[in-house]
Amino acid sequence: MKKMNYVCAAVACAATPVLAGIYGDPADAVHAWSVHDHNRPNPVKVEAEAGRPPSDAVVLFDGTKESFEKNWSDEKGNPSKWRLGADGDFYCVPGWKNGGAIYTRGSFGDCQLHLEYRHAADIGLVSDKKGPQMHGNSGVFLMSNYEIQVLESYGTNPADMKNPNYADGQAGAVYAENPPMVNPARKPGQWQVYDIIFHQPVWEGLRMVHPGSVTVLFNGVVVQDHWEMEGLTTHKVRRPLAPHAAKLPLFFQDHGCEVHFRNIWIREIPSRYANVTHGGPGADENAVMALRRKTAAKLFAKIEKPVKPTIENMEALAEVIGYAREGAYEKTWKETAVAFHGVLDKMTDAEWTAKKDALLKLREELDTLIRNGVVPQSCGTRKRISAAALRLGWEK
Ligand code: MG
């Protein structure tokens, strides 16, 4: 039954506009904003039309020669030997490492990356001679150090659909660490899509705070779910994580195989540790309090001085102390409350009735602060409103 109540409440809230005043539980030690806080900045608007890169993405390759030359190079920054294809793509020169890896000229850290890749339709089965790792091998090396494998992995033995590759080396694997959870690879010749969300490891000097993580959607299917990296990509041996620059180029591997890439865009995203003011692993109590004080100061400045003992001002001050109950805010709150009690104590029942809705709203706001320990249970304003509510039959 309780669960049902939560569902109903959520539906009701969705249709309720968030107005000024206290609406949800207030700021606390690790949250600078209250629940449903109308003072909290809204997210930046991004246009995200179907089939188009989001408006804030860095388009790394759009099929044109210009974007190829502008954004890509070999390891040393010279023009890449990879070739432009006929399908809005570029591709690795076939043969054993003829072109070298292709690097972004720009450097990136934590990111959302979109790309599409394709193998030739006639790539055939895995050659016993060359081995499964020569069957359309490339790779997306995030920050030059963490490989999401690219390989022809549809299913190389039609008799049993058994892929002869080692599991941690097939398409969608965090190479040498974690196989994809499932194999959603399409047939050779079709475009395959990677959407990758990557967070680099977080270090404080030589102390690792978090190993970082990678999430991969392969053709729209989650194959890596927040995999926490175990090492820098290598082959056959385990190589521990180690600090590196905060931003590095990404590259696509040249493993001697022809692999085509197109529609490549990237969005830099903040580390979860960059958020120090509201929840998450980076929340810093000093930074939280600094922002709470900043918000309190902004709201306090909007109240006309000297502060008159009105319902509106009690609401506004309650909101201020919800962020920071201290100093001038504390003093003004207490003084205004005393004066406000004087006003309430002189009101006739007709005056109480005329202000019923506003007074009950104020009581609800005070209840939120009382529930969260900002205002004590003994709050005189609340007691007066509740007494009137009982006397005048407002209580349901
Ligand atoms: Mg590879």
Image (cartoon, rainbow, N blue to C red):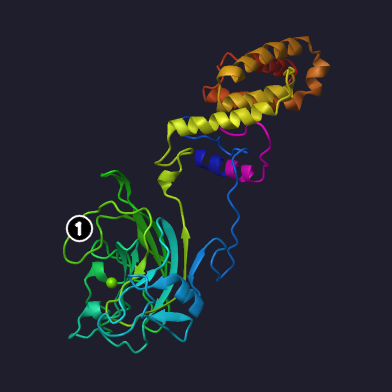
**How would you rate the neighbour count of disc 1 (Cα within 10 Å): few for under 14, some for 14-19, many for 20 or more?**
few
Across and down, in percent, residue 278 comes to 48, 38
In the image, 178 versus 140, the foreground residue is 140
> In the displayed structure, would residue 187 be above or below residue 282?
below
* Secondary structure mostly taken by the magenta-highlighted segment of the chain: loop
Q: Position of residue 89 (x, y in %)?
A: 45, 80
Determine the residue positioned at 55% across, 40% down: 5
Image point 62% across, 34% down: which residue?
23
Does mark 1's beta carbon lie closer than 8 Å to ligand 1?
no
Q: Nearer the viewer, residue 386 or 176?
A: 176
Would residue 63 be visible to someone looking at this image?
A: no
In the picture provided, is 296 more to the left or to the right than 251? Answer: right
Question: Tag 1: residue type?
Answer: Arg
Indicate whether 395 appears above or below 56. above
What residue occupies the far bottom of the structure in this picture? Answer: 122
Q: Position of residue 135 (x, y in %)?
A: 27, 81
| Residue 82 higher or lower than 168, as above or below | below
Q: Is residue 372 visible?
A: yes
Q: Position of residue 108 (x, y in %)?
A: 41, 59
Q: Which quadrant of the figure shows ligand 1?
A: bottom left
Q: Which residue position is annotated with label 1?
A: 239
Quadrant of the snapshot with the C terminus: top right
- Secondary structure, mark 1, is loop
User: Magenta region: which residues?
Assistant: 9-26
On the image, which quarter does residue 190 sit in?
bottom left
